[in-house]
Image (tube, helix red, strand yellow):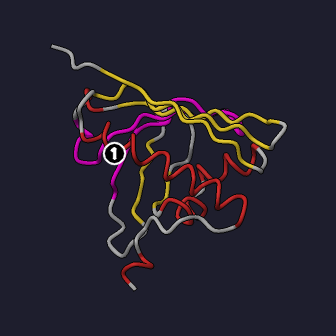
Amino acid sequence: MTAERTSFVYVSYIASTPEKVFEAITRPEITRRYWGHENVSDWTPGARWQHVRDDDARSVDLVGKVVEVTPPNRLVITWTGASQEAEPDSYSRVTFEIEPDAYGVRLCVTHDDLIVGSQMEAGVSKGWPLVLSSLKSCLETGKGFDLSGRAKAA
C-alpha cells in the first residue's frame, strides 16, 4: 500500500536579487548564517547534496540529489533524513523558484511528495517558515536567526 502524500508551498518576498537568493540557498558559508546548516553540493544535476550541521560534530541531517538547477531562478532537489537515505519511499522533493519582483524577489518554495503523518512532514511544516524568515532577515539586514543554537549554548 502506498502512503498518502502531501505538499506545502511557502512564498516570501525578499528585498534582494535573484542571484543573491540563489547563492544564499546553495553556498555553505551563507546557509550557515541563517540556517545553522551548510547545504553542500556541486549543484549539478544528479549530484548528491548534504545538509551539514554547523557544529563541532558536522553531522549530516538531510541528503538528496540535485534534480534540476537553473541559476539564479530554479533549483529542484530530493530530500530525506540521512538515516533514511537507503529507503526510496522516504524521499520528498523541494523546488525553489526565484523570480524578480517589483519588491525585489519572489521566492516560492514547494516541498512536495511528503508522507502524511511522518516526522518529516511535521518538521518541514514548522521548519520552512522559520528558515525562510531567517533567510529574508539575513539578506535584508545581514543577520539571520540563530538556528544553530550556538548563542543559547554560550
- What is the magenta segment's predominant secondary structure? strand
Determine whether 142 is above or below 78 in the image: below
Left/right of residue 101 with respect to residue 83 in the rendered view: right
Q: Residue at x 41, y 59 (%)?
A: 52
Q: Residue at x 56, y 43 (%)?
A: 43
Q: Name the quarter where the C terminus is drawn.
A: bottom left
Q: Name the quarter where the N terminus is drawn.
A: top left
Residue annotated with mark 1: 123
Q: Nearer the viewer, residue 8 or 79?
A: 8
Relative image position of residue 119 (x, y in whole percent): 25, 41
Determine whether 37 is above or below 26 in the image: below
Relative image position of residue 5 (x, y in whole percent): 31, 21
Answer with the quarter of the image where residue 56 lies. bottom left
Which region is colored magenta? 60-86
Relative image position of residue 18 (x, y in whole percent): 75, 43
Q: Residue at x 39, y 38 (%)?
A: 79
Number of marks: 1
Left/right of residue 41 with respect to residue 81 in the rendered view: right
Mark 1 is surrounded, within 10 Å at the Cα level, by few (under 14), some (14 to 19) or many (20 or more) other residues, namely few
Q: Residue at x 34, y 29 (%)?
A: 114
SS under mark 1: helix
Determine whether 99 is above or below 37 in the image: above
Amino acid found under the numbered disc labelled 1: Gly
Q: Nearer the viewer, residue 56 or 107?
A: 107
**Residue most extreme to the right:** 102
Magenta span has 74? yes
**Residue most extreme to the left:** 1
Relative image position of residue 31 (x, y in whole percent): 55, 58
**Residue most extreme to the top:** 1
Left/right of residue 71 with respect to residue 129 in the rendered view: right
